[in-house]
Image (spheres, helix red, strand yellow):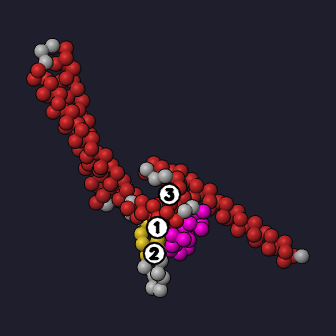
Amino acid sequence: MYEKNGDQVNQANWNQFEEKKDEFIQSMAKNMELYGITPSIGRLYGTLYFSDKPMTLDDMRDALSMSKTSMSTGVRTLTNMKMVEPVFKRGVRKDLYQTEQDWHKSFSALFSRQWKKATETNIEEAGEAKEELEKLLQKVEEQELINQIHEAIERIDYANNYYQWLLRFVEVVESGEIYSIIPKE
């Protein structure tokens, strides 16, 4: 009887462990939305992160009860974001994947790519808007509208200065210089 009770306690401990791990994975998945990652891909990442060995698409499908196509799409997304990497293991024919263990590296790659792209788009749009306003300024005679256009151009210039600063900040993150300012722990 003592062994049975010990087995029940042991199983309860394992269940509690799995429950807490699943809660943390769910929290990770929710917070990854900040980076443009869907909750399902976030759960995939969390599952890979807590796996004690690289996983195949079939392993992932079984662990998450999702389609193999969803797993493939999710792994491709995470690989492109440098959060997951393929792993070679002699004798294994299927593709294996594991998470990038250095979260700083993953964040740097993800942050840099997303912010750089958005900032460059904003710079381009600011340039186009300023150019169109300057053309309009050549045709306008009404002083109030001239004043408003000048004010708008000043605001666009201010925004463009911010975008240029943001690109320099992205470069600091991308190059790893950020870690000399805010060291990894």
Queried whether the magenta region covers residue 47, the answer comes back as no
For the residue labelled by badge 2, is the local secondary structure a helix, a strand or a loop?
loop
Of tags 2 and 1, which is closer to the observer?
Answer: 2
What amino acid type should be assigned to the residue bearing mark 1? Thr
Q: Which residues are magenta?
A: 49-65
Instruction: Give coordinates of residue 60: x percent, y percent.
Output: 55, 67
Q: Quadrant of the N terminus?
A: bottom right
What amino acid type should be assigned to the residue bearing mark 3? Ile
Residue nearer the viewer, 47 or 3: 47
- Which residue is depicted at the point 43% across and 75% down? 87
Looking at the rendering, which quadrant does residue 24 occupy? Answer: bottom right
Mark identifier at residue 41: 3
- Mark 1 — residue? 99
Mark 1: few/some/many CA within 10 Å (<14, 14-19, 20+)? many
Give the CA separation, mark 1 to mark 3.
13 Å
Residue nearer the viewer, 139 or 102: 139
Mark identifier at residue 95: 2
Residue nearer the viewer, 181 or 32: 32
Asked if residue 183 shows in the view, the reply is no
Give the CA separation, mark 2 to mark 3.
18 Å
Residue farthest to the left, as pictured: 138
Residue farthest to the bottom, as pictured: 91
- Which residue is depicted at the point 46% across and 53% down? 37
